[in-house]
Image: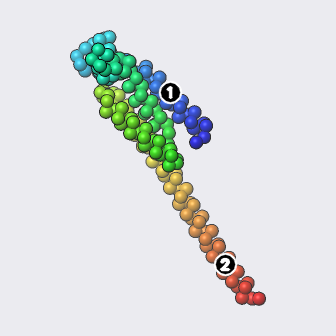
Amino acid sequence: MKIGRVVGILGVGTLCVVTGGLAAPAIGAAVGGAMGLSGAAATSAGLAAIGGGSLAAGGLGMAGGTAMIQAVAAGLGVIGSKIAFSAADAAKAKKENEELREALKQVTLDNATKEKIIIQLNMKIDMLKEALEKEEEKTNKNEQVIQILQEQINDLYITLEEVLKRK
């Protein structure tokens, strides 16, 4: 994998971690608001709920909720910025997708967050479809070139046979 591609992927992933961290209070407040709370209580309760409950209850608390939001954001960022062009990249992307699905199972998402995730996943699907179309075009062109080369080789064999007959 080229270094520029690695740096790009890491950059987008880092940006999403930061963005996820900045969005965490708003997401926590939305979750807490759904519990009937408001203000700082909604934010605290929402983040703690996302983190699996309060520290006293054995959960990861607000820090765990913030970390979970950042992990989901980072996973979406990496998935959204990377297209796998080799078997190793594809296997890694599949593992990242599985990890993201597992992380999403652990989180309660509000509709706005769900919508953002859906948009990012659809963008990734569109990117992959475009990459697939380009690869299929290359394959079709390569098949044509292979056929032309094979025809030229066959034609040269015929010419070679004519030369051998003339001895």
Residue name at image x 57 percent, y 65 percent: 144
Q: Is residue 113 left or right of residue 4?
A: left
**Res. 48 image quadrant:** top left
The answer to which of 165 and 112 lies nearer the viewer is 165
- Location of residue 76 in the rendering, given as x and y in whole percent from the top left corner: 43, 33
The answer to which of 112 and 87 lies nearer the viewer is 87
Disc on the earlier residue, 2 or 1? 1
Look at the image and tell me in which quarter the N terminus lies: top right
Image position of 1 with respect to 69: above or below: below
Residue name at image x 25 percent, y 14 percent: 37
What type is the residue that disc 2 sits on? Tyr
Image position of 105 with respect to 141: above or below: above
Near mark 2 (Cα within 10 A), the count class, few <14, some 14-19 or many ≥20, is few
What type is the residue that disc 1 sits on? Thr
Look at the image and tell me in which quarter the C terminus lies: bottom right
As helix, strand or loop, the secondary structure at mark 1 comes to helix
Residue extending furthest left? 36
Image position of 67 with respect to 75: above or below: above
Disc assigned to residue 157: 2
As helix, strand or loop, the secondary structure at mark 2 comes to helix
Where does label 1 land, which residue? Answer: 14
Callout count? 2
Are the residues at dot 2 and dot 1 in contact (C-beta closer than 8 Å)?
Answer: no
